[in-house]
Image (spheres, rainbow, N blue to C red):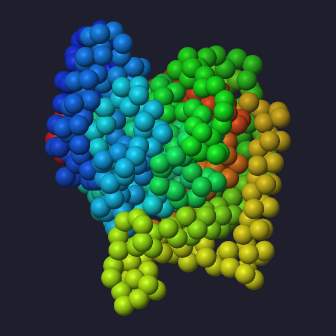
Amino acid sequence: MMLTDLTLIAARDGLRAKRFSARELTAAHIAAAEALNPLLNAFITLTPESALAQADAADAALARGDAGPLAGLPLAIKDLFCTEGVRTTAGSRMLADFIPPYESTVTANLLRDGAVFLGKANLDEFAMGSSNMTSAFGAVQNPWRRAGDAAPLVPGGSSGGSAAAVAARLALGATGTDTGGSIRQPAAFCGLAGIKPTYGRCSRYGIVAFASSLDQAGPIARSVADCAALLGAMAGFDAKDSTSADRPVPDYVAACGRSLRGLRIGVPREYRAPGMAAEIETLWETGKAWLREAGAEIVDVSLPHTKYGLATYYIVAPAEASSNLARYDGVRFGLRETGEDLTEMYERTRAAGFGAEVRRRILIGTYVLSAGYYDAYYLRAQQVRALILRDFTEAFATVDAILTPTAPSAAFAQGEKMDDPVAMYLNDIFTVPASMAGVPAMSVPAGLDARGLPLGLQVIGRPFDEAGVFAVASAIERAAGFADVPAVRAGAVP
Ligand code: GLN
């Protein structure tokens, strides 16, 4: 077995047992990334020198016996997290040369625990998208291929570089962010586990803002326990984010093997999408059977406002984005184009800096916030958002967790859905309700479709019950026994 094939937990144990060094582990991942990144484009920036220096520091700490919980484990960091002294682009021309003078809290927490950063992972521009096609640094390829078909597929988005890097064995795990599905959908498309924790669980400090009332950081990794180990490091109260929750972070890894006996799992009848593949329906049924066998009781629940989830998300998220992205005006951050006067400088800078999808979001957001339309769109959407949350609150009065598919399809081909934004937005139909409600939700790889592509199931939990989500997700993981690997990966001939 190659070092790059280990799970994060197995690599941690191997380091502690001195079976290999952090330098060897990191060097193996750097070699894999250097070999495959030209094809996959999973990383915008690779930082091999600082990664090896961090690995050496981890080896020294391991030798001294005071190593942190993630010492020497190589990760990919979504290029939306500010990293001190390392270019942070948000996948945009606007920030192509932005070098943050400070570190985000989540990445600082990972560094505190000894993690090694291999580089900055590609993403949809400003995290807006479901395909990683909107990055100013080029599309990312999914390491998976349809059986007998070499056509490049999308890795999902917006954390597509993070997911592609982990699936192709270029990193043991990655950070992602999820505003409406950007951790869960790419995890599902790439055969990985990924969790969006409760809003407030991870600090947003130093994460380039998209829609601040929805944005949450979380991990993507090859196993549920790997995600648990990463989230344990990433989460925690931070005075620098006023929405950060001041609550103890439980031992998530310990929650992974927990029995489901006596748990009630809800299945919402409204989670159906037009044109959803029959095999996703079948997989959902299989998921219910697995949970029953693990001792849980399956109950029907109703989340009646689910049908408004997508429509309200695509009002609230662009509204907040239009406000957050107002700061990119050429004055203080990033790109500046010259103009005859201030207005022309603004216009030229924003026209040159933002891609088509980001512009579309700014236009939609500005429209729904403008006088005369505010009440009809933004205010209504906020009211419906409260109803979506109420649906979940009522469901969680009778069930401990909720099981749904993660996405209505498997990975699609690059270029598909590009001329129809609504078709693209439909990817998020099962992920946005949990985002609107702020509750934790995880995607677990559960099987393959008829063409050999991974499909995920989603577990949604009560606010701050990530431990419960990990328990249910790991039961699915055990029952599914998902062990398939993508065609393009470290050690395989691309
Ligand atoms: N696909 C969704 C969007 O485009 C979600 C993105 C995200 O979660 N960052 O807005």
Q: Nearer the viewer, residue 138 or 21?
A: 21
Residue shown at 42%/66% (left/top)?
332
Which quadrant of the figure contains the N terminus? top left
Q: How many marks?
A: 0
x then y, percent, for residue 260: 67, 20
Above or below, 52 relative to 59: below
x then y, percent, for residue 180: 58, 54
x then y, percent, for residue 453: 40, 45
Above or below, 5 relative to 36: above
Residue shown at 26%/23% (left/top)?
57
Compared across the picture, whether 31 is left or right of 92 comes to left
Residue 442 in sight in this render:
no
Q: Nearer the viewer, residue 55 or 463?
A: 55
Residue shown at 57%/37% (left/top)?
238
Compared across the picture, whether 198 is left or right of 477 comes to right
Name which quarter of the figure residue 475 lies in.
Answer: top right
Residue 17 in sight in this render:
yes
Name which quarter of the figure residue 154 lies in.
Answer: bottom left
Compared across the picture, whether 68 is left or right of 24 comes to right
Residue shown at 30%/47% (left/top)?
85
